[in-house]
Amino acid sequence: MKKYIPVLKRTKLFSGVGEEDISSLLSCLGARKKEYKKGEYILREGEHISDIFILVEGKIHIQKDDYWGNRSILSVLSVGEMFGEAYSSPESGALLNDVVAVEDSSVIFFDVRRILTTCSSACRFHNMIVQNMFFAISEKNRRLVQKLGHMSGRTTRAKLISYLSEEAKRQGSSSFTVPFNRQQLADYLCVDRSAMSSELCKMRDEGLISFEKSRFELL
Amino acid sequence: MKKYIPVLKRTKLFSGVGEEDISSLLSCLGARKKEYKKGEYILREGEHISDIFILVEGKIHIQKDDYWGNRSILSVLSVGEMFGEAYSSPESGALLNDVVAVEDSSVIFFDVRRILTTCSSACRFHNMIVQNMFFAISEKNRRLVQKLGHMSGRTTRAKLISYLSEEAKRQGSSSFTVPFNRQQLADYLCVDRSAMSSELCKMRDEGLISFEKSRFELL
DNA sequence: ACAAGTCGGTTGTTTTTACAACGGAAAAGA
DNA sequence: TCTTTTCCGTTGTAAAAACAACCGACTTGT
């Protein structure tokens, strides 16, 4: 676990905490590590958890498959990001989504209640970590709202424009790469892949965008 | 402002804090109150805020109108609920939605940074309030995820079923009232009102549901 | 009591999407 | 290298939603 301390240091959760303190915090909080192969489920819808998870290696999707087999991808997490924090408090119900490794991944997890309820030797970080959690979950909140913004468009085109514009803004360039292949992008925007594909080509032919594989450009 | 202390006491934010302490906290945090008429905008998309807001009277919608005039209702807040907390930290950008009073409403607001960064006379509540904020925002997070679940359905029917089932579950009865009229429900689910209306009737004729005004029953 | 406005349902038309199926190019694996 | 799989664009058809317009019932305000 030691080798991941530099990674942890750069996470939002441990922002402001030194490496040696992280080290003692980890043992104090009973942190554990687990590895997952590409395609493996890390968590499943309906589970109850009391841990929070930090991805220290790989890439994961938060997603859900509905009754009819349609997949919807809620979000993509990459190294350093946290998940499970919204479901780890006692009053929260079961998980609403699956968490799946889309690359070979490593995850560190530990019980949040120890952060929230006790005041052990980690006490001096207690406040800072809770505050960091608050900031992190705030940011997630804003991301969810953004995603809802993309999905509120009535047509596939509106969803694509909304998503691509935001991605361009986020990456600070009109030319950018999306973290999805076509099927995944369709799953993310909750539309049919082939319909989306033809819509993308229509937009290209109209001179709105250009693209090649996962690289897009707004014109 | 005093008259709202019993209301505040029952909010998630002040959970566990006594009335007399709330009173001193309020003045300490420089809380202010403002009133809004039905239809008035409390906050607008694009604004930057550093306050959090608590609705102490009335009812508000978090919503957004897109380029083409389609409205999408993100959520409905009723008395005792908090808003703005995800946008009040310094690193967060501009508001992504409008906040509108749908009834005559009263709002109390104060600067979060005072909670997060200082340790004044309110110090003994400092931790508790930050923790409460964390729980509250966690719950919002889960609600947003649920809403995304409703919107991820491909058809209007799927969205309706998802929303109505959850509402039934939440209210613990197969017969329940939704906080929307038809136009608002359509705006919430991001579909066309007339299409939704006819879909509802189709579902009724198929014996799936029954309804009258805003009261629905799952059969 | 009357006028104006809101609300919910209905209909018909046009546009858009879902779905299923195919094929070629590229990538992955043996 | 050869085979298999994945990825992406394309097409045609059926289904669904958007849009616009209208009506009657009910509310609201004067």
Image: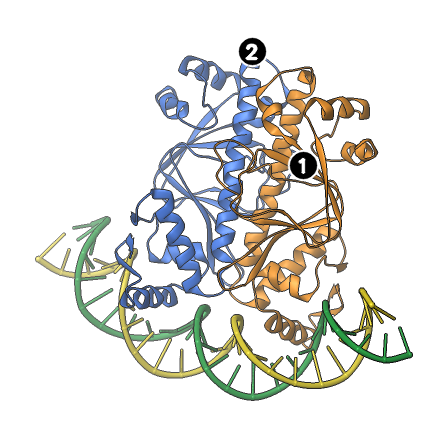
Chain colours: A orange, B blue, C yellow, D green
* Residue B35 placement: quadrant: top left
Q: Quadrant of the N terminus of chain A?
A: top right
What residue sits right under mark 1 in the picture?
A: B91
What residue sits right under mark 2 in the picture?
A: B121
B149 sits to left or right of B10: right
Q: Amino acid at mark 1?
A: Glu
Callout 1 crowding tier (Cα within 10 Å): few <14, some 14–19, many ≥20: few
Label 1 vs 2, first from the N-terminus:
1
Chain designation of label 1: B
Question: Residue B135: percent from the left, percent from the top?
Answer: 52, 31
Q: Amino acid at mark 2?
A: Ser
* Residue B94 placement: quadrant: top right
Query: Mark 1 and mark 2, same subunit?
Result: yes
B165 sits to left or right of A81: left
Chain designation of label 2: B
Callout 2 crowding tier (Cα within 10 Å): few <14, some 14–19, many ≥20: few
Label 2 SS: loop
Q: CA distance from mark 1 to mark 2?
A: 26 Å
Looking at the picture, does residue B101 appear above or below residue B115?
below
